[in-house]
Image: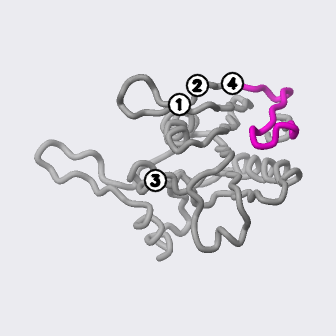
Amino acid sequence: MNATLTAPTAAPGIVPPLRWTVEEFHRLGETGFFKGRRPILLRGVLLEQGKMNPPHAGAILLATEVIRGFMPTGYVLRAQLPLVLSLDTDPIPDLAIVTGSVREAVSNHPKSAVYVLEVSDTTIDTDLTVKAELYATAGIQDYWVLNLNKRQLHVLRDPAPLPTGLGATAYRNHKIYGPEESVAPLAFPDKLIRISDLLP
């Protein structure tokens, strides 16, 4: 379960909680402060994801194996590594496919991806709301959420600004696939992935 690492929202007249930048978040991580923890940064707030259970880890390994099997040159598959969406957001997705080479990632973290997968057991609400809005705003065209509890894959596509005038962005296309169905990443339309192959 996500747990905030920052102070709760302050009452009127009280000093507000500290909001972190990605630079501060990464610098703190380099000191070893997060050793043994799995933090992410969403809109300046540090969230602790808690200990990863075996099914979650297994799903990441299965998806990595499936995707690596068809990855062409010019793309890199990143597992639980930084993806800097803005100055105050680094969700560290379970899997992301980015363009370029491994060598290019040595000097800078990517700021976009052609595909993102989040494995969800206790964080399905956050993954389908807060994270979905952040990935949509960042222009991620293909966002997948693997719901381990219901053994389903949510595929979210076609990000577009909401007609509210509030600057929010959302995915206009949201489909849910069962274990016996298949779907291909947008970047690799001829590479069908069977959902059961992703499930532990």
Q: CA distance from mark 3 to mark 1?
A: 17 Å
Q: Position of residue 18 (x, y in %)?
A: 29, 57
Magenta stretch containing residue 191, yes or no?
yes
Q: Amino acid at mark 2?
A: Arg
Q: Earlier in the sequence, mark 3 or mark 1?
A: 3
Q: Position of residue 120 (x, y in %)?
A: 63, 40
Q: Position of residue 91 (x, y in %)?
A: 53, 51
Residue at 58 percent of width and 39 percent of height: 122
Q: Earlier in the sequence, mark 4 or mark 3?
A: 3
Q: Which residue is mark 3?
A: 86
Magenta stretch containing residue 35, yes or no?
no
Asked if residue 38 is positioned above or below residue 146 in the image, the reply reads below
Q: Residues within 10 Å of mark 3 (few under 14, many from 20)?
A: some
Mark 2 or mark 4, which is nearer to you? 2
Q: Residues within 10 Å of mark 1 (few under 14, many from 20)?
A: some
Asked if residue 98 is positioned above or below residue 198 in the image, the reply reads below
Residue at 71 percent of width and 52 percent of height: 97
Q: Which residue is mark 1?
A: 160
Q: Which residue is mark 4?
A: 175
- For residue 3, side relative to residue 135 (left or right): left
Q: Amino acid at mark 1?
A: Ala
Q: Main secondary structure of the magenta part?
A: loop
- Is there CB contact under 8 Å for labels 1 and 4? no
- For residue 120, side relative to residue 187 (left or right): left
Question: In what element is the residue under mark 1?
Answer: strand
Which disc number belongs to residue 172? 2
